[in-house]
Amino acid sequence: MFAIGFAQRNEDVKRLVDEGIVLHDKGDYDGALKKYDEALKIDTNDFDANYEKSLSLLCAKKYDDCIVLSNDIIQKFSSHPNIRQAYSNLGSALDDARRQDEAIKAYDKGLEKFPDYYLLHFNKGLTYMRMKNYADAAESYNTALKYNGLHASSNYYVGTILQDDNRIPALLAYSVFLAIEPQSERSKKAFDAIQEIVYRGVKKEGNNTGISISMDMLDNKKKKKAENNFSDIELMFTLLGSMDNSNGMDSLAKTPADKFDFKLQLLINSLEINLKTGKGFYWEHYVPFFIELKKKNYTNVLSHIIYYSADKDAQVWANVNAEKVREFYDWLQNYQW
């Protein structure tokens, strides 16, 4: 099989593809497809016209057509530098067509050629989630994060998968997600999830606060030797969740964001103490990030970003400290995961 050469593009083809992309971005997938077809009449071997057509077919839910075209692209343009994106479209179309086993195979074929392409790992995780295979989904998201620690969706779904059974790394994952994507519909869900995690086991009746502690936190030697175990820290964090209305807390922190920041700093202290004995991806990936976050004095910034959409005090703080927020984002963008 021969590889198609990549000569200089026809200007009319380029213009039509650009017009198609504009229509696609507006949600006019049929209009975009017409533009791509016009371009392909001029040059059937233009990679961008073929690829963008496959993407619009996917978004238009024309999955069978997308599958056929994506397979054709993979065959015809095997040496193109952007061919990895075609594997992503193929897997997504197969997944949406409820052909999950084939989707996994498509992602794996792509990963054989592009093992460090985070979107293939992420999309593979989405397929595993649809199959209710949450362990493999988490593994795929973890691998995506190894290659792109600031991929918002991978952080979000790690939090979603871990929230019920491993709440400390879930809290860390949701916090990173909210730093990346602080104002969206998913952000509201992530914020609510953080509230549930922080106050799980805390019961308030009038002026009294009770604490419910899971037996898993108290005595499970086998579990504590396993990877990604945070049970000792969960116990401490449950106790922190009961402090909000205490006189001591009110003297240290007034606003919800400041109270969260106080608990976050104590959590990071505990994580740092246990880092040497902690094992597994979440210890290796998230914990050093949060330790460095605290060393840089950015926990207060992150806390106010997390609370930004839910608390007016956090919004005022962020506006007053805009330079500090910009400094935090400069650091975040350059952090080496």
Image (cartoon, rainbow, N blue to C red):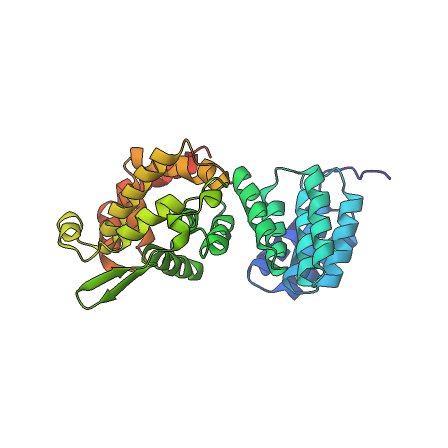
Name, please, the residue furthest toward the right.
Answer: 1
* Image position of 30 with respect to 221: above or below: below
Q: Where is residue 25 in the image (x, y as percent from the top left)?
A: 56, 58
Above or below for 187 versus 115: below
Residue 83 appears in view = no
Image quarter of residue 246: bottom left
Q: As rendered, which of 184 and 96 lies closer to the eye?
A: 96
Figure quadrant of the N terminus: top right
Residue lying farthest to the bottom in this orientation: 206
Would residue 102 be found to the left or right of residue 308 on screen? right
Query: Residue 225: horizontal and vertical position, in percent?
Result: 48, 39
In the displayed orientation, state which residue is furthest to the top: 276
- How many dots with numbers? 0
Horizontal relation, residue 242 to residue 279: left or right: left
Front position in the image: 187 or 11: 187
Q: Going 47% across and 52% down the picture, which residue do you hit?
A: 162
Residue 128 vs residue 297: left or right? right
Viewer can see residue 326: yes
What's the residue at 79%, 50% (across, down)?
72
Horizontal and vertical percent position of residue 194: 37, 55
Seen from the viewer's position, the closer of residues 201 and 12 is 201
Percent across and percent down for residue 23 are 59, 60
Residue 54 location, quadrant: bottom right
Q: Which residue is drawn at 69% across and 48% down?
A: 107
Residue 102 to residue 223: above or below: below
